[in-house]
Amino acid sequence: MKNKSKMKLYGFWGVCALMLLTVFLHLDKVKAEEQEKEQICEGIFLDSIDISGMTVEEAQKEYENYLKELRDVTVQFRLEEASCEVDMSDLDLKAELDAVIEEAYAYGRRGNILKRYKEIIAISQENKVLSVPISLNEEYLIEVLDEELSDYIVPAKDASIEFADGTLTVVEGENGKELNAEETVDELRKAIENWSGEKDLLVTVATNELEPEHTTKELNAVSDEIGVFETRYSTGDASRNNNIMNAANKISGSVIYPGEEFDTMEHLVPFTTANGWSYAGAYLNGEVISDIGGGICQVSTTLYNAVLRAELEVTERYPHSMAVGYVQLAADAALNEGTKNFRFKNNTENPIYIYAYASGGTLHVSIYGKEYRDESRTIEYVNEILNVIPAGDAIETVDESKPAGYRVVTQTAHTGYQANLWKKIYEDGELVDTVLVNTSGYNASPERVTVGPAAPEAPAEPETPAEPVTPTDPGTTEPAVPSDEGGNPATPAAQ
């Protein structure tokens, strides 16, 4: 019995060995056939392209033809009711093909014989789709979409304030949309991967909803006039008047949120006629010159004084080179692009709003916010003159084209000063503190006069010749040599 059992056992293992040998021989045959043909296994795709049974070179050519046809496709991008078309040829499509084809070719050729066989069987039962990385010019695409769909891709609009008829009105903000570039490009890539030869592709543009940064609730706190100041200007100079009104309009309507800084120059540049500026008088190196934007310093000065009365934090301020007449000494704020600016910070807990206008010789600036000071507290600003610097002797310039005796003052004399500005603080009418705000220096400048040339001296009357005499000594009488000093023009004074 034992011998028969052993015989059956040996027979079973013999059959198994024979079957296994048959499988290995079959696998070797399959491997040998595939490697001999150097063909890619059946059931392998590059995206939507079937490359079964192709050589590496054939698969590469097939995909390049596919890519060439893809470049002739037009993509329609839709966003709500809007749409725009982009030619695929403009997107600079490029495929990273080599590594993917190498992977496709490796199927059924890697690992031991059993693993290779299992890979081949698995692919024959379910196709293997390999994705080919495709690069495209995303920057160009986003630029086109932003431009073509600009009516729908818009920034959120903050709540704002309007001032009319002495009343502040808060205008609600609006939501906006921004292009979600990453999702939109992903949608395009999916459309490319699933492309089946049609001449047009449809892609939905992805966007993100944008909410206003600043809301109606914030601006509803702006209810009180916390600082106001006015200066007067002459209405006789049309160019200067224009500059004052232009500057007032450019700063009016500004909202400064808590912690933000207001930069006056930022609201005024560029100083060009296209931006509304005219040529008018301005200070330069102790002289009055004609410069584009002349007069804007009166606006920054009026704003400065309104800011002082609102007790906001001044972060940058400069005096004029010479004293001005529309405010007390040390209460001015000069502007000069690149060198002088006026800036201040909103150091309150609520937004502030600037309202400014110039009309009929009055320049007005109001600062609105939420009153944060006690009713019993009042302030005033007074200056203290530390030093007076005389203007000095007049400077005359001779103009030869003018007649003798011509004399016109081209620039009045300016006395120089050094002065302090003090802030006096009162509670219930009693002075409780005095704070130094600034110390300012102003240059002296002499009167400048243009004169005509000096009148020439009248010629001297000729003398009656004396009776000839016989000289006691040999010689002759020499005629007098006339002087030319009286006929020379005066030497101009040094400038």
Image (spheres, rainbow, N blue to C red):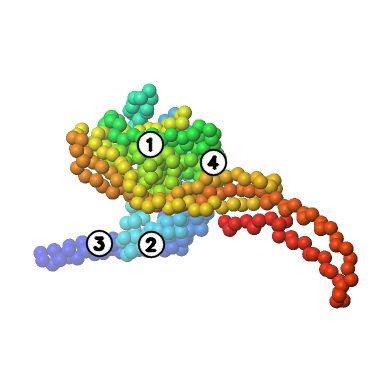
Where disc 2 sits, the SS reads: loop
> Which residue has dot 2 on it?
109
Residue at (53% x, 33% y) in the render = 236
The residue type indicated by label 4 comes to Ala
Give the residue at x 10% y 64%.
Answer: 1
CB of mark 2 within 8 Å of CB of mark 4? Answer: no
Res 280 label: 4
Mark in the foreground, 1 or 3: 1
Can you identify the residue that label 1 sits on? 254
Find residue 468 and report its image quarter: bottom right
Distance between the Cα atoms at labels 2 and 1? 72 Å
Percent across and percent down for residue 160 are 35, 31
- Of labels 3 and 2, earlier in sequence is 3
Q: What residue type is labelled 1?
A: Ser
Which residue in the protein does label 3 denote?
15
In the image shown, does 443 or 238 lie closer to the viewer? 443
Q: How far is the residue under mark 3 from the one under mark 2?
A: 29 Å
- At 43% from the left edge and 51% from the top edge, which residue is drawn? 416
Q: Is mark 1 on a helix, strand or loop?
A: loop
Q: Which of marks 2 and 4 is in front?
A: 4
Q: Are marks 1 and 4 in contact (CB under 8 Å)?
A: no
Residue 244 lies, with reference to residue 481, above or below; the image says: above
Q: Which is more N-terminal, label 4 or label 3?
A: 3
